[in-house]
Image (cartoon, helix red, strand yellow):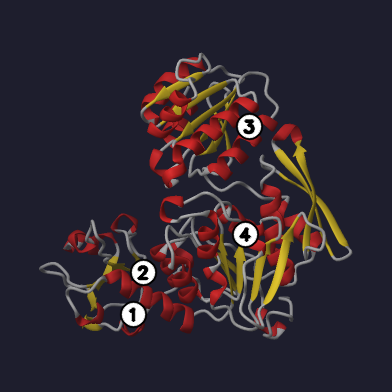
Amino acid sequence: MISNYFYSKPISFFTNPTSRTTPPNLSNSPLWTITEIAESVNGKILKWGPPGIVCTDTRRLELNKNQWFFAITGNRFDAHDFISPELADKGCVGVIGNRVCKNWDKGFVQVEGNVNVNTVNSLINMACYARNNRFSGVLVGVTGSVGKTTTKSMIALALEGLGVNVFQSYGNWNNRIGVALSLIGIHRDADIAVLEMGMSGKGEILELARIARPGIRVVLNVGASHLESFGSLEDVAIAKGEIFQEAEPGDVCVLNADDPLVANLSVPPGVRKMFFGKRRGCDVRLVAAEAANGGFGVQVVLEKEKEMVKFVIPSPGLHLALDACAAAAVATLLGVSLAQVGTSLSKFAPVHMRSELQVARSGITIINDAYNANPISTRAAIDLLKGIACDGKRVAILGDMLELGSVEIESHQRILSYCREACIDLIGLAGYRFLKAAEKMNLIKADYIVVAECAVILSQKIVKRLKCNDVVLVKGSRAMQMEKVVDVIRMM
Protein backbone atom coordinates (compact mmCIF):
# COMPACT_ATOMS: atom_id res chain seq x y z
CA MET A 1 0.00 0.00 0.00
CA ILE A 2 1.02 3.62 -0.30
CA SER A 3 2.79 4.89 2.78
CA ASN A 4 0.39 6.24 5.37
CA TYR A 5 2.79 9.11 5.94
CA PHE A 6 1.79 10.61 2.66
CA TYR A 7 -1.38 8.98 1.46
CA SER A 8 -4.32 8.62 3.81
CA LYS A 9 -6.79 6.64 1.68
CA PRO A 10 -7.60 3.17 3.06
CA ILE A 11 -6.22 0.03 1.48
CA SER A 12 -9.66 -0.80 0.03
CA PHE A 13 -9.06 2.05 -2.40
CA PHE A 14 -6.71 -0.29 -4.28
CA THR A 15 -9.15 -3.09 -5.02
CA ASN A 16 -7.79 -5.53 -7.64
CA PRO A 17 -4.76 -3.39 -8.44
CA THR A 18 -2.50 -3.94 -11.43
CA SER A 19 0.85 -2.39 -12.16
CA ARG A 20 0.74 -0.29 -15.31
CA THR A 21 2.57 2.62 -16.82
CA THR A 22 0.89 4.29 -19.74
CA PRO A 23 2.27 5.99 -22.83
CA PRO A 24 -0.37 7.86 -24.85
CA ASN A 25 -2.25 4.65 -25.64
CA LEU A 26 -5.71 5.55 -26.88
CA SER A 27 -7.25 2.50 -25.24
CA ASN A 28 -6.21 3.85 -21.83
CA SER A 29 -7.25 7.46 -22.42
CA PRO A 30 -10.21 8.76 -20.42
CA LEU A 31 -13.47 9.71 -22.09
CA TRP A 32 -14.74 13.27 -21.82
CA THR A 33 -18.43 14.06 -22.21
CA ILE A 34 -19.37 17.14 -24.17
CA THR A 35 -20.74 18.78 -21.04
CA GLU A 36 -17.44 18.16 -19.22
CA ILE A 37 -15.55 19.61 -22.17
CA ALA A 38 -17.70 22.72 -22.26
CA GLU A 39 -17.48 23.23 -18.51
CA SER A 40 -13.71 22.73 -18.44
CA VAL A 41 -13.00 25.32 -21.16
CA ASN A 42 -15.76 27.75 -20.12
CA GLY A 43 -17.14 27.08 -23.56
CA LYS A 44 -20.43 26.89 -25.42
CA ILE A 45 -21.90 23.76 -27.00
CA LEU A 46 -22.80 24.70 -30.57
CA LYS A 47 -23.10 21.15 -31.95
CA TRP A 48 -23.61 18.00 -29.87
CA GLY A 49 -21.22 15.06 -30.01
CA PRO A 50 -20.60 11.78 -28.18
CA PRO A 51 -18.09 11.20 -25.35
CA GLY A 52 -14.52 10.84 -26.55
CA ILE A 53 -10.84 11.33 -25.89
CA VAL A 54 -8.90 14.52 -26.58
CA CYS A 55 -6.36 14.88 -29.38
CA THR A 56 -4.37 17.92 -30.56
CA ASP A 57 -2.86 16.40 -33.71
CA THR A 58 -4.98 15.42 -36.69
CA ARG A 59 -2.24 12.96 -37.70
CA ARG A 60 -2.99 10.91 -34.58
CA LEU A 61 -6.69 10.51 -35.30
CA GLU A 62 -7.81 6.88 -35.48
CA LEU A 63 -11.05 5.31 -36.63
CA ASN A 64 -13.45 4.01 -33.99
CA LYS A 65 -11.67 5.91 -31.17
CA ASN A 66 -14.16 8.80 -30.80
CA GLN A 67 -11.63 11.63 -30.66
CA TRP A 68 -12.27 15.30 -30.03
CA PHE A 69 -9.80 17.51 -31.87
CA PHE A 70 -8.59 20.41 -29.72
CA ALA A 71 -7.49 23.09 -32.18
CA ILE A 72 -4.38 24.79 -30.73
CA THR A 73 -3.43 28.30 -31.78
CA GLY A 74 0.10 29.63 -31.48
CA ASN A 75 2.33 32.46 -32.65
CA ARG A 76 3.32 30.59 -35.81
CA PHE A 77 0.45 28.21 -36.42
CA ASP A 78 -3.30 27.80 -36.17
CA ALA A 79 -4.61 24.26 -35.99
CA HIS A 80 -8.06 25.47 -37.05
CA ASP A 81 -6.64 25.48 -40.59
CA PHE A 82 -6.58 21.67 -40.46
CA ILE A 83 -10.28 21.29 -39.71
CA SER A 84 -12.17 19.78 -42.62
CA PRO A 85 -15.15 17.42 -43.07
CA GLU A 86 -12.63 14.66 -43.87
CA LEU A 87 -11.56 14.58 -40.22
CA ALA A 88 -14.80 12.76 -39.42
CA ASP A 89 -13.66 9.91 -41.66
CA LYS A 90 -10.51 9.60 -39.53
CA GLY A 91 -12.32 9.21 -36.23
CA CYS A 92 -12.95 12.82 -35.19
CA VAL A 93 -16.33 13.21 -33.47
CA GLY A 94 -15.99 16.85 -32.50
CA VAL A 95 -13.88 20.00 -32.40
CA ILE A 96 -12.87 22.12 -29.40
CA GLY A 97 -11.75 25.53 -30.53
CA ASN A 98 -12.66 28.90 -31.92
CA ARG A 99 -14.32 27.88 -35.18
CA VAL A 100 -15.02 25.02 -37.54
CA CYS A 101 -15.06 24.73 -41.31
CA LYS A 102 -18.08 24.89 -43.61
CA ASN A 103 -20.25 21.78 -43.67
CA TRP A 104 -18.95 20.58 -40.31
CA ASP A 105 -21.70 18.32 -38.94
CA LYS A 106 -19.99 16.75 -35.91
CA GLY A 107 -19.64 18.06 -32.37
CA PHE A 108 -18.37 21.58 -31.71
CA VAL A 109 -17.54 23.27 -28.41
CA GLN A 110 -16.53 26.89 -28.88
CA VAL A 111 -14.04 27.87 -26.19
CA GLU A 112 -15.16 30.74 -24.00
CA GLY A 113 -17.56 31.74 -26.79
CA ASN A 114 -14.87 33.91 -28.39
CA VAL A 115 -13.59 33.31 -31.92
CA ASN A 116 -10.32 35.13 -31.19
CA VAL A 117 -9.30 33.52 -27.89
CA ASN A 118 -5.90 31.83 -27.54
CA THR A 119 -6.93 28.19 -27.28
CA VAL A 120 -3.72 27.19 -25.43
CA ASN A 121 -5.16 29.02 -22.42
CA SER A 122 -8.34 27.01 -22.83
CA LEU A 123 -6.30 23.81 -22.93
CA ILE A 124 -4.70 24.86 -19.64
CA ASN A 125 -8.17 25.42 -18.19
CA MET A 126 -9.13 21.91 -19.27
CA ALA A 127 -5.99 20.53 -17.61
CA CYS A 128 -6.81 22.32 -14.34
CA TYR A 129 -10.33 20.91 -14.49
CA ALA A 130 -8.90 17.42 -15.01
CA ARG A 131 -6.56 17.80 -12.05
CA ASN A 132 -9.24 19.20 -9.75
CA ASN A 133 -12.17 17.01 -10.74
CA ARG A 134 -10.96 13.82 -12.41
CA PHE A 135 -7.77 12.72 -10.62
CA SER A 136 -7.60 12.29 -6.85
CA GLY A 137 -4.44 10.21 -6.57
CA VAL A 138 -0.82 11.12 -5.84
CA LEU A 139 0.89 13.34 -8.40
CA VAL A 140 4.69 13.41 -8.64
CA GLY A 141 6.32 16.36 -10.43
CA VAL A 142 9.96 16.10 -11.59
CA THR A 143 12.20 18.91 -12.82
CA GLY A 144 15.93 19.46 -13.31
CA SER A 145 18.42 20.46 -15.98
CA VAL A 146 19.14 16.86 -17.00
CA GLY A 147 17.64 13.44 -16.35
CA LYS A 148 13.95 14.36 -16.06
CA THR A 149 12.59 11.84 -18.53
CA THR A 150 14.81 8.98 -17.36
CA THR A 151 14.06 9.63 -13.68
CA LYS A 152 10.35 9.91 -14.39
CA SER A 153 10.45 6.49 -16.09
CA MET A 154 12.47 5.02 -13.22
CA ILE A 155 9.98 6.35 -10.66
CA ALA A 156 7.08 4.78 -12.53
CA LEU A 157 8.96 1.50 -12.81
CA ALA A 158 9.94 1.50 -9.12
CA LEU A 159 6.34 2.10 -8.10
CA GLU A 160 5.26 -1.17 -9.67
CA GLY A 161 6.15 -2.69 -6.30
CA LEU A 162 3.00 -1.10 -4.86
CA GLY A 163 0.72 -3.04 -7.17
CA VAL A 164 -1.21 0.08 -8.13
CA ASN A 165 -2.02 1.81 -11.41
CA VAL A 166 0.74 4.23 -12.38
CA PHE A 167 0.45 6.80 -15.16
CA GLN A 168 3.50 8.57 -16.55
CA SER A 169 3.54 11.41 -19.04
CA TYR A 170 4.55 10.47 -22.55
CA GLY A 171 8.08 11.16 -23.82
CA ASN A 172 9.26 14.55 -22.68
CA TRP A 173 5.85 16.23 -22.51
CA ASN A 174 7.13 18.82 -20.04
CA ASN A 175 6.04 22.25 -21.34
CA ARG A 176 2.65 23.97 -20.98
CA ILE A 177 0.98 21.94 -23.70
CA GLY A 178 2.69 18.69 -22.75
CA VAL A 179 1.82 18.93 -19.05
CA ALA A 180 -1.74 19.96 -19.92
CA LEU A 181 -2.21 17.00 -22.27
CA SER A 182 -0.73 14.68 -19.65
CA LEU A 183 -3.26 15.82 -17.05
CA ILE A 184 -6.12 15.59 -19.53
CA GLY A 185 -5.02 12.07 -20.47
CA ILE A 186 -4.58 10.53 -17.00
CA HIS A 187 -6.70 7.38 -17.09
CA ARG A 188 -9.61 7.12 -14.74
CA ASP A 189 -8.24 4.30 -12.57
CA ALA A 190 -4.77 5.80 -12.07
CA ASP A 191 -3.63 5.91 -8.46
CA ILE A 192 -0.33 7.71 -9.06
CA ALA A 193 0.73 10.03 -11.90
CA VAL A 194 4.37 10.97 -12.63
CA LEU A 195 4.94 14.08 -14.73
CA GLU A 196 8.07 15.96 -15.74
CA MET A 197 8.26 19.74 -15.88
CA GLY A 198 10.65 21.74 -18.06
CA MET A 199 11.32 25.39 -18.67
CA SER A 200 13.08 27.90 -20.86
CA GLY A 201 12.43 31.00 -18.75
CA LYS A 202 11.39 32.37 -15.38
CA GLY A 203 7.88 31.66 -14.14
CA GLU A 204 7.30 28.60 -16.31
CA ILE A 205 7.89 25.97 -13.63
CA LEU A 206 5.68 27.92 -11.22
CA GLU A 207 2.84 27.88 -13.74
CA LEU A 208 3.22 24.15 -14.37
CA ALA A 209 3.26 23.45 -10.63
CA ARG A 210 0.09 25.50 -10.20
CA ILE A 211 -1.61 23.50 -12.94
CA ALA A 212 -0.46 20.06 -11.77
CA ARG A 213 -0.34 20.66 -7.98
CA PRO A 214 2.13 17.82 -7.27
CA GLY A 215 2.13 16.29 -3.82
CA ILE A 216 5.71 15.15 -4.33
CA ARG A 217 8.00 17.72 -5.94
CA VAL A 218 11.45 16.64 -7.17
CA VAL A 219 14.42 18.78 -8.26
CA LEU A 220 17.23 16.68 -9.72
CA ASN A 221 19.99 19.19 -10.52
CA VAL A 222 20.88 22.61 -11.87
CA GLY A 223 23.10 22.90 -14.94
CA ALA A 224 24.12 25.17 -17.78
CA SER A 225 20.99 24.76 -19.88
CA HIS A 226 18.84 27.70 -21.03
CA LEU A 227 21.57 30.12 -19.89
CA GLU A 228 20.64 32.47 -22.71
CA SER A 229 17.48 33.22 -20.70
CA PHE A 230 19.26 33.52 -17.34
CA GLY A 231 22.17 35.50 -15.99
CA SER A 232 23.74 32.71 -13.94
CA LEU A 233 23.36 29.19 -12.60
CA GLU A 234 21.95 30.71 -9.44
CA ASP A 235 19.13 32.20 -11.53
CA VAL A 236 18.51 28.80 -13.11
CA ALA A 237 18.29 27.31 -9.61
CA ILE A 238 15.74 29.91 -8.53
CA ALA A 239 13.64 29.10 -11.60
CA LYS A 240 13.83 25.34 -10.95
CA GLY A 241 12.97 26.00 -7.30
CA GLU A 242 9.65 27.50 -8.38
CA ILE A 243 8.28 23.97 -8.17
CA PHE A 244 8.58 24.26 -4.37
CA GLN A 245 7.22 27.79 -4.08
CA GLU A 246 3.55 26.95 -3.48
CA ALA A 247 3.97 23.53 -1.87
CA GLU A 248 1.49 23.01 0.95
CA PRO A 249 1.82 21.31 4.34
CA GLY A 250 1.70 17.58 3.68
CA ASP A 251 3.56 17.88 0.39
CA VAL A 252 7.11 16.50 0.18
CA CYS A 253 9.99 18.20 -1.62
CA VAL A 254 12.72 15.82 -2.81
CA LEU A 255 16.14 17.40 -3.36
CA ASN A 256 19.57 16.35 -4.65
CA ALA A 257 21.92 16.81 -1.69
CA ASP A 258 24.99 16.59 -3.97
CA ASP A 259 24.05 19.76 -5.87
CA PRO A 260 24.49 22.79 -3.58
CA LEU A 261 22.23 24.92 -5.75
CA VAL A 262 19.45 22.37 -5.25
CA ALA A 263 20.17 21.44 -1.64
CA ASN A 264 19.92 25.07 -0.55
CA LEU A 265 16.54 25.73 -2.14
CA SER A 266 13.93 26.81 0.38
CA VAL A 267 10.49 25.30 0.87
CA PRO A 268 7.41 26.78 2.56
CA PRO A 269 6.88 26.26 6.31
CA GLY A 270 5.40 22.90 7.19
CA VAL A 271 6.63 21.20 4.02
CA ARG A 272 8.91 18.20 4.45
CA LYS A 273 12.29 17.99 2.71
CA MET A 274 13.68 14.64 1.62
CA PHE A 275 17.28 14.36 0.36
CA PHE A 276 18.92 11.87 -1.99
CA GLY A 277 22.54 11.66 -3.10
CA LYS A 278 26.00 10.42 -2.16
CA ARG A 279 26.35 12.47 1.01
CA ARG A 280 26.03 10.83 4.39
CA GLY A 281 22.81 11.76 6.12
CA CYS A 282 20.70 11.60 2.96
CA ASP A 283 17.30 9.95 3.37
CA VAL A 284 18.26 7.69 0.46
CA ARG A 285 22.01 7.45 -0.15
CA LEU A 286 23.91 6.36 -3.23
CA VAL A 287 26.62 4.28 -1.56
CA ALA A 288 28.38 3.09 -4.71
CA ALA A 289 28.08 3.06 -8.49
CA GLU A 290 30.38 1.33 -10.93
CA ALA A 291 30.32 0.03 -14.47
CA ALA A 292 29.16 -3.55 -14.94
CA ASN A 293 28.93 -5.98 -17.85
CA GLY A 294 31.75 -4.37 -19.80
CA GLY A 295 30.30 -0.91 -19.36
CA PHE A 296 26.88 -1.88 -20.70
CA GLY A 297 25.34 -1.79 -17.22
CA VAL A 298 25.69 0.02 -13.89
CA GLN A 299 25.97 -1.68 -10.52
CA VAL A 300 24.27 0.45 -7.87
CA VAL A 301 24.25 0.24 -4.08
CA LEU A 302 21.56 2.25 -2.29
CA GLU A 303 20.93 2.70 1.41
CA LYS A 304 17.96 3.96 3.40
CA GLU A 305 18.13 3.92 7.19
CA LYS A 306 19.44 0.41 7.96
CA GLU A 307 18.35 -1.18 4.69
CA MET A 308 20.77 -1.62 1.79
CA VAL A 309 20.28 -3.01 -1.71
CA LYS A 310 22.64 -3.85 -4.57
CA PHE A 311 21.42 -4.25 -8.16
CA VAL A 312 22.49 -3.75 -11.77
CA ILE A 313 20.76 -1.35 -14.14
CA PRO A 314 21.01 -3.04 -17.56
CA SER A 315 21.91 0.17 -19.35
CA PRO A 316 25.19 2.11 -19.72
CA GLY A 317 26.03 5.35 -17.95
CA LEU A 318 27.10 5.96 -14.36
CA HIS A 319 24.82 9.01 -14.29
CA LEU A 320 21.88 6.58 -14.13
CA ALA A 321 22.84 5.70 -10.56
CA LEU A 322 21.84 9.10 -9.20
CA ASP A 323 18.61 9.02 -11.23
CA ALA A 324 17.91 5.64 -9.61
CA CYS A 325 18.62 7.15 -6.19
CA ALA A 326 16.06 9.89 -6.85
CA ALA A 327 13.52 7.30 -8.01
CA ALA A 328 14.16 5.26 -4.87
CA ALA A 329 13.54 8.33 -2.70
CA VAL A 330 10.10 8.84 -4.26
CA ALA A 331 9.16 5.15 -4.33
CA THR A 332 10.16 4.46 -0.71
CA LEU A 333 8.34 7.60 0.37
CA LEU A 334 5.19 6.01 -1.02
CA GLY A 335 5.82 2.67 0.68
CA VAL A 336 7.94 0.58 -1.69
CA SER A 337 10.74 -1.31 0.07
CA LEU A 338 14.27 -0.54 -1.01
CA ALA A 339 14.72 -4.20 -1.98
CA GLN A 340 11.71 -3.99 -4.29
CA VAL A 341 13.10 -0.78 -5.85
CA GLY A 342 16.26 -2.70 -6.72
CA THR A 343 14.27 -5.55 -8.23
CA SER A 344 12.22 -3.16 -10.34
CA LEU A 345 15.10 -0.98 -11.56
CA SER A 346 17.09 -4.05 -12.55
CA LYS A 347 14.54 -4.27 -15.40
CA PHE A 348 15.01 -0.65 -16.53
CA ALA A 349 15.25 -0.02 -20.27
CA PRO A 350 16.55 3.32 -21.62
CA VAL A 351 14.11 5.88 -22.92
CA HIS A 352 14.26 6.26 -26.72
CA MET A 353 17.26 8.35 -27.86
CA ARG A 354 18.60 8.64 -24.30
CA SER A 355 21.67 6.40 -23.92
CA GLU A 356 19.81 3.87 -26.05
CA LEU A 357 22.02 1.04 -27.31
CA GLN A 358 21.55 0.02 -30.93
CA VAL A 359 23.56 -2.19 -33.28
CA ALA A 360 24.09 -1.30 -36.94
CA ARG A 361 23.90 -3.84 -39.74
CA SER A 362 27.69 -3.73 -39.89
CA GLY A 363 27.98 -4.57 -36.18
CA ILE A 364 28.87 -1.05 -35.03
CA THR A 365 27.57 -0.37 -31.52
CA ILE A 366 25.65 2.92 -31.35
CA ILE A 367 24.88 4.86 -28.18
CA ASN A 368 21.88 6.84 -29.37
CA ASP A 369 21.75 9.83 -27.02
CA ALA A 370 20.51 12.18 -29.70
CA TYR A 371 17.41 13.57 -28.04
CA ASN A 372 19.05 16.61 -26.41
CA ALA A 373 22.31 17.94 -25.02
CA ASN A 374 23.85 20.39 -22.59
CA PRO A 375 27.32 20.48 -21.00
CA ILE A 376 26.36 18.23 -18.06
CA SER A 377 24.66 15.53 -20.11
CA THR A 378 27.33 15.62 -22.82
CA ARG A 379 30.14 15.06 -20.31
CA ALA A 380 28.15 12.17 -18.83
CA ALA A 381 27.71 10.69 -22.31
CA ILE A 382 31.46 10.94 -22.98
CA ASP A 383 32.11 9.17 -19.66
CA LEU A 384 29.68 6.47 -20.79
CA LEU A 385 31.54 6.06 -24.09
CA LYS A 386 34.89 5.90 -22.34
CA GLY A 387 33.68 3.17 -19.98
CA ILE A 388 32.25 0.78 -22.58
CA ALA A 389 34.34 -2.21 -23.67
CA CYS A 390 35.53 -1.61 -27.22
CA ASP A 391 37.74 -3.57 -29.65
CA GLY A 392 37.79 -0.75 -32.19
CA LYS A 393 37.59 3.04 -32.06
CA ARG A 394 35.60 5.04 -29.58
CA VAL A 395 33.82 7.68 -31.65
CA ALA A 396 31.96 10.76 -30.37
CA ILE A 397 29.62 12.39 -32.89
CA LEU A 398 28.40 15.63 -31.36
CA GLY A 399 25.95 18.30 -32.46
CA ASP A 400 25.81 21.83 -31.10
CA MET A 401 24.47 22.43 -27.59
CA LEU A 402 21.95 25.25 -27.85
CA GLU A 403 20.57 27.92 -25.50
CA LEU A 404 23.88 28.52 -23.67
CA GLY A 405 23.97 32.26 -24.27
CA SER A 406 27.25 34.14 -23.91
CA VAL A 407 29.20 31.05 -22.78
CA GLU A 408 28.26 28.87 -25.73
CA ILE A 409 31.64 28.79 -27.52
CA GLU A 410 33.54 28.38 -24.26
CA SER A 411 31.22 25.50 -23.30
CA HIS A 412 31.85 23.76 -26.62
CA GLN A 413 35.60 24.20 -26.19
CA ARG A 414 35.39 22.53 -22.78
CA ILE A 415 33.58 19.57 -24.28
CA LEU A 416 36.26 19.18 -26.93
CA SER A 417 38.92 19.30 -24.23
CA TYR A 418 37.00 16.67 -22.27
CA CYS A 419 36.90 14.42 -25.34
CA ARG A 420 40.67 14.72 -25.70
CA GLU A 421 41.21 13.96 -22.01
CA ALA A 422 39.02 10.88 -22.41
CA CYS A 423 41.20 9.76 -25.34
CA ILE A 424 38.28 9.55 -27.77
CA ASP A 425 39.71 8.19 -31.02
CA LEU A 426 37.50 10.03 -33.51
CA ILE A 427 35.32 13.12 -33.01
CA GLY A 428 32.59 14.25 -35.40
CA LEU A 429 31.22 17.76 -35.00
CA ALA A 430 28.04 19.26 -36.47
CA GLY A 431 27.07 22.90 -36.16
CA TYR A 432 28.48 26.40 -36.03
CA ARG A 433 29.31 26.39 -32.33
CA PHE A 434 31.44 23.25 -32.36
CA LEU A 435 33.14 24.39 -35.56
CA LYS A 436 33.98 27.75 -33.99
CA ALA A 437 35.28 26.02 -30.86
CA ALA A 438 37.47 23.69 -32.94
CA GLU A 439 38.87 26.65 -34.85
CA LYS A 440 39.75 28.48 -31.65
CA MET A 441 41.56 25.37 -30.39
CA ASN A 442 43.39 24.84 -33.71
CA LEU A 443 41.73 21.45 -34.12
CA ILE A 444 39.84 22.03 -37.33
CA LYS A 445 42.45 20.16 -39.42
CA ALA A 446 43.31 17.47 -36.88
CA ASP A 447 43.10 13.99 -38.39
CA TYR A 448 40.82 12.76 -35.59
CA ILE A 449 38.29 15.57 -36.13
CA VAL A 450 35.54 15.50 -38.76
CA VAL A 451 33.47 18.70 -39.09
CA ALA A 452 30.31 19.67 -40.96
CA GLU A 453 27.62 22.29 -40.88
CA CYS A 454 24.79 19.88 -40.13
CA ALA A 455 23.99 16.30 -39.16
CA VAL A 456 23.24 15.10 -42.70
CA ILE A 457 26.57 16.26 -44.14
CA LEU A 458 28.46 14.98 -41.11
CA SER A 459 26.90 11.53 -41.45
CA GLN A 460 28.08 11.33 -45.07
CA LYS A 461 31.62 12.23 -44.06
CA ILE A 462 32.09 10.18 -40.92
CA VAL A 463 30.71 6.82 -42.09
CA LYS A 464 33.81 6.52 -44.27
CA ARG A 465 35.90 6.41 -41.09
CA LEU A 466 33.87 3.78 -39.20
CA LYS A 467 34.48 0.03 -38.87
CA CYS A 468 32.42 -2.85 -37.56
CA ASN A 469 33.99 -3.05 -34.09
CA ASP A 470 33.69 0.66 -33.30
CA VAL A 471 31.50 2.10 -30.54
CA VAL A 472 29.83 5.35 -31.56
CA LEU A 473 28.16 7.96 -29.35
CA VAL A 474 25.71 10.32 -31.07
CA LYS A 475 24.51 13.36 -29.10
CA GLY A 476 23.31 16.92 -29.70
CA SER A 477 20.56 19.40 -28.96
CA ARG A 478 17.12 18.54 -30.30
CA ALA A 479 17.21 21.10 -33.10
CA MET A 480 20.41 19.55 -34.48
CA GLN A 481 18.48 16.37 -35.44
CA MET A 482 21.43 14.10 -34.70
CA GLU A 483 19.19 11.05 -35.04
CA LYS A 484 19.79 11.46 -38.79
CA VAL A 485 23.39 10.39 -38.15
CA VAL A 486 22.14 7.38 -36.19
CA ASP A 487 19.88 6.37 -39.07
CA VAL A 488 22.75 6.46 -41.58
CA ILE A 489 25.09 4.46 -39.36
CA ARG A 490 22.43 1.85 -38.58
CA MET A 491 22.01 1.10 -42.29
CA MET A 492 25.74 0.60 -42.91
Q: N-terminal of the two: label 2 or label 4?
A: 2
Residue 118: horizontal and vertical position, in percent?
25, 71
Q: CA distance from mark 3 to mark 4?
A: 28 Å
Residue 152: horizontal and vertical position, in percent?
59, 59
Residue 290: horizontal and vertical position, in percent?
77, 41
Q: Are marks 1 and 3 in contact (CB under 8 Å)?
A: no
Q: Report the amino acid beneath label 1.
A: Ile
**Is residue 94 among the parts visible in the rendering?**
no
Task: Residue lying at the far left in this picture: please name it.
Answer: 102
Q: Nearer the viewer, mark 3 or mark 4?
A: 4
Q: N-terminal of the two: label 2 or label 3?
A: 2
Q: In the drawing, what numbered circle is on residue 37?
A: 1
Q: Nearer the viewer, mark 1 or mark 4?
A: 4
SS label for mark 1: helix
Q: Report the amino acid beneath label 4.
A: Leu
Q: Residues within 10 Å of mark 2 (few under 14, many from 20)?
A: many
Q: Which residue is mark 2?
A: 54
Q: N-terminal of the two: label 1 or label 4?
A: 1
SS label for mark 4: helix
Instruction: Name which quarter of the figure residue 124 lies in.
Output: bottom left
Q: Which residue is mark 3?
A: 385
